[in-house]
Image (cartoon, rainbow, N blue to C red):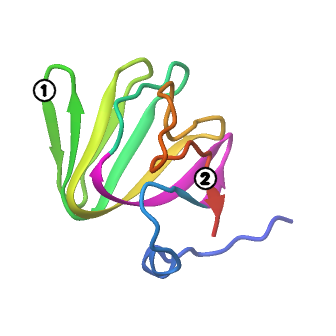
Amino acid sequence: MKNIVVINLTEKLYKFSDLWSPKIIAELNDAYVKLAKLNGEYIWHKHDHEDEMFFVISGTLKIELRDKVLELQPGELVVIPKGIEHRPVADSEVHVMLIEPKSTLSTGDAEITNDKKSTHGEWI
């Protein structure tokens, strides 16, 4: 039988400080449940084959789309459909939960920059 455990999000968030580097905390079918800390502007990108979900745990997250800006508060989430170009922006540190297919790269189709690495995430 698989080991079933309760995951404390606060404890997991204390385990890392790096920004824009999702950490995997669980598996759900063919998806990972990830936590990330965000601050500043990410890069414009899209995911051609996967939807992307942002659930805000703390802070205020803006998701810039080409035609509008979404603003998410703690307890709110948004699903960005595959193929939609977007850019997350955090004016101060934001903690988010992501649930996305295991194949999802954090930078989608965008070119990798020195401070924004492309990753599937790492386990914590």
Residue identifier under label 1: 68
**28, 72: nearer the viewer:** 72
Q: Is residue 82 above or below residue 78?
A: above
Residue identifier under label 2: 121
Position of residue 52 measured from the top left corner of the image (x, y, whole percent): 44, 36
Quadrant of res 101: top right
Q: Amino acid at mark 2?
A: Gly
Q: Residue at x 36, y 46 (%)?
A: 54
Q: Residue at x 51, y 19 (%)?
A: 48
Quadrant of res 63: top left
Q: Which residues are magenta?
A: 25-41
Q: Amino acid at mark 1?
A: Lys
Position of residue 93 measured from the top left corner of the image (x, y, whole percent): 27, 65
Residue 114 is one of the magenta-drawn residues: no
Q: Quadrant of the C terminus?
A: bottom right
Q: Residue at x 68, y 40 (%)?
A: 30
Most frequent secondary structure within the magenta stretch: strand
Residue at the far front: name it: 114
Q: Is residue 109 above or below residue 12?
A: above
Disc 1 on helix, strand or loop? loop
